[in-house]
Image (tube, rainbow, N blue to C red):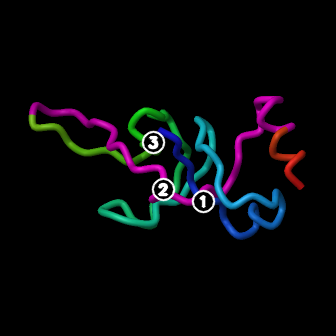
Amino acid sequence: MDFGSPLSKELREKYKVRTVRPREGDSVKILRGEFKNIEGKVTKVFPEKGQVNVEGVTREKLAGGNAPVPIRANNVIVTAVNLDDSRRKKKMEAEK
């Protein structure tokens, strides 16, 4: 399954790309659902499900404690891209 998240307007103009595959370390803003308008970093990515975990988005468990809530990747907008990976950086810069 191929999945991606839209980029913010500023990043879209900078990199000339509409969507990007979310990665750990990217900053995102949730656009839909119960956690709408929450911003945070991606902590875990589930490519096979097309979902991401976002820092600070948790649900209380019945037995106590908190569990991260997976958010669909197309329901978040990427506000900052993690360019630590040289291959990703090269690809983002090359698409101009």
Mark 1: secondary structure: strand
Residue 46 in the image, given as x and y percentages of width and height: 44, 33
Which residue is disc 2 drawn over?
74
Earlier-in-chain disc, 3 versus 2: 3
Which residue is disc 3 drawn over?
52
Earlier-in-chain disc, 3 versus 1: 1
Q: Residue at x 75, y 58 (%)?
A: 17
User: Camera-side residue: 22 or 59?
Assistant: 22
Mark 3: secondary structure: strand
Given the image, on which type of amino acid does mark 3 rest? Val
Name the residue furthest front.
Answer: 1
Badge 1 local density, few (<14 within 10 Å), some, or many (20+)? many
Residue 31 part of the magenta segment? no
Image quarter of residue 19: bottom right
Q: From mark 3 to mark 2, how far is it between C-alphas?
A: 10 Å
Q: From mark 3 to mark 1, how far is it between C-alphas?
A: 14 Å
Front: mark 3 or 1: 1
Badge 3 local density, few (<14 within 10 Å), some, or many (20+)? many
Image vertical order of residue 87 relative to residue 58, above or below: above
Mark 2: secondary structure: helix
The residues colored magenta run 63-90
User: Camera-side residue: 64 or 19?
Assistant: 19
Residue 7 in the image, given as x and y percentages of width and height: 65, 60
**Is the residue under label 2 in contact with that under label 1 (CB below 8 Å)?**
yes
Q: Any mark on residue 6, and which? A: 1
Image quarter of residue 63: top left
